[in-house]
């Protein structure tokens, strides 16, 4: 008994102190955890709590300016269910640690997409047939049956795709305020589903591409039905109106083009002042590039077939700009409609300084027009101004 009793020696004071310290810290952590889970539950679920971290400023101010500003962050970003809700609360501690140690990743992006369940707590997909104004047909139930998720079309609803627009880096946090958030959310091409999104998806999945697949009517604007508009009035539109034409006619071209390509959003965001640049595309340039227009303008006009056209066309045309709808003025570029240019018959290089040095064949400085020129040039054309020696 004495020998067995002697083997059970009391623990050293240092060990008892460490054990007591671990137990105390454990109890303190549990108290904080359960306090956060119960008394702090409401506070950590609010959108204002999310905005308390400076790295969340872009998300907070865009959400505040969005159509979902009355919906708390957790309603969308936490999947419904007790288990998911509890997991989200545990992650709060992790995010606080990252914030305090400056170990968070920027720009912030969602690790997983927002599930349809989050949207369906407010939206009845089975009964939602039409969304925007006008005659657009959006059968949400059919899209859901095909496996199309809500965020595939509505990814910019709450935040305007700011991470993709490159305006949420750490160096940008100081620029963010309510005004910036409202400004970036005012551009509907980042907040609302665009026709390009629909068309790209339909093309990839071999879905219907016809106008009637998404529109109840033929969508022909009233001014397009005017006979004057059809007869040539549409050529008098202003360059500033071309982007409106693009909304429909860009999808009617069989060839791709990037006439209206703009600088990325972040380039204007990084500037101190907001300089909105207008497009430099001309009406004739557009008509020669979009095949929907080119198919018509590429047809040789009737008056070009008259025998006297070659010699009289300079007097016939009172509006020379009409010629440039199909033709180019000089050999600096090639028209997609025709290779015939003004410079084909009227070489402007003769009027330029040192044109002889640009001539493809070496000629003497004092060279004059003679029959040797006709080895390449057309005599009838040259003789309109020159006399052969």
Image: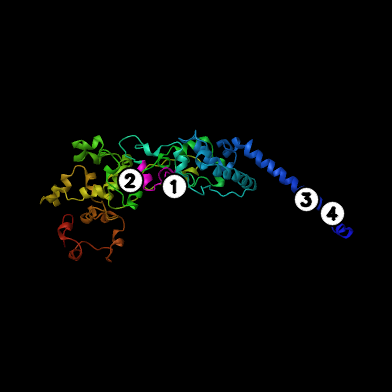
Q: Secondary structure at mark 2?
A: loop
**Part of the protein shown in magenta:** 140-155
Q: Residues within 10 Å of mark 3 (few under 14, many from 20)?
A: few
Q: Is residue 106 left or right of residue 230?
A: right
Residue 153 occupies quadrant:
top left
Q: For the point 13% across and 48% down, which residue is it?
A: 302
Please give the residue where the numbered disc 3 appears in the rendered image: 19
The x and y percentages for residue 102 are: 62, 48
Q: Secondary structure at mark 4?
A: loop
Q: Are marks 1 and 3 in contact (CB under 8 Å)?
A: no
The x and y percentages for residue 53 are: 59, 41
Q: Residues within 10 Å of mark 4 (few under 14, many from 20)?
A: few
* N-term-proximal mark, 2 vs 1: 1
Report how far apart the C-alphas of labels 2 and 3 lie in the structure: 77 Å
Please give the residue where the numbered disc 2 appears in the rendered image: 281
Q: Secondary structure at mark 1?
A: loop
Q: Are marks 2 and 1 in contact (CB under 8 Å)?
A: no
The x and y percentages for residue 58 are: 53, 41
Residue 387 falls inside the magenta stretch: no
Which sits in the foreground, 388 or 147? 147
Q: For the point 78% across and 51% down, which residue is it?
A: 18
Report how far apart the C-alphas of labels 2 and 1 lie in the structure: 18 Å
* N-term-proximal mark, 4 vs 3: 4
Tag on residue 12?
4
Please give the residue where the numbered disc 1 appears in the rendered image: 264
- Quadrant of the rendering where the N terminus is positioned: bottom right
Between marks 1 and 4 in the image, the one whose residue lies nearer the viewer = 4
Report how far apart the C-alphas of labels 1 and 4 lie in the structure: 68 Å
């Amino acid at each position: 008994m004495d020998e067995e009793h002697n083997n059970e020696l009391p623990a050293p004071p240092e060990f008892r102190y460490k054990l007591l310290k671990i137990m105390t810290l454990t109890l303190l952590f549990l108290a904080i955890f359960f306090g956060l889970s119960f008394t702090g539950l409401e506070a950590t679920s609010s959108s204002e709590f999310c905005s308390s971290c400076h790295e969340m400023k872009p998300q907070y101010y865009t959400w505040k300016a969005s159509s979902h500003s009355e919906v708390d962050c957790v309603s969308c970003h936490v999947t419904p269910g007790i288990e998911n809700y509890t997991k989200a609360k545990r992650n709060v501690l992790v995010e606080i640690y990252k914030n305090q140690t400056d170990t968070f990743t920027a720009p912030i992006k969602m690790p997983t997409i927002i599930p349809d369940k989050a949207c369906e707590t407010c939206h009845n997909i089975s009964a939602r047939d039409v969304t925007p104004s006008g005659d657009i047909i959006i059968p949400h139930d059919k899209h859901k049956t095909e496996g199309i998720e809500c965020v595939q079309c509505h990814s910019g609803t709450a935040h305007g795709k700011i991470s993709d627009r490159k305006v949420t880096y750490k160096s940008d946090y100081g620029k963010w305020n309510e005004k910036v958030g409202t400004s970036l959310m005012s551009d509907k091409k980042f907040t609302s589903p665009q026709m390009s999104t629909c068309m790209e998806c339909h093309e990839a999945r071999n879905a219907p591409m016809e106008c009637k697949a998404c529109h109840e009517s033929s969508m022909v604007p009233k001014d397009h039905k005017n006979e004057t508009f059809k007869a040539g009035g549409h050529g008098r539109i202003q360059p500033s109106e071309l982007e409106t034409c693009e909304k429909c006619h860009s999808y009617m071209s069989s060839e791709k083009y990037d006439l209206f390509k703009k600088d990325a959003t972040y380039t204007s965001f990084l500037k101190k002042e907001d300089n909105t640049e207008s497009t430099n595309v001309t009406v004739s340039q557009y008509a020669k590039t979009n095949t929907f227009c080119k198919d018509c303008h590429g047809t040789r006009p009737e008056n070009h077939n008259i025998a006297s056209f070659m010699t009289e066309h300079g007097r016939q045309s009172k509006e020379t700009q009409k010629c440039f709808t199909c033709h180019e003025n000089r050999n600096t570029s090639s028209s997609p409609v025709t290779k015939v240019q003004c410079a084909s018959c009227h070489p402007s290089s003769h009027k330029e300084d040192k044109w002889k040095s640009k001539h493809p064949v070496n000629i003497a400085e004092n060279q004059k027009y003679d029959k040797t020129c006709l080895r390449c040039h057309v005599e009838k054309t040259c003789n309109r101004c020159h006399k052969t020696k």
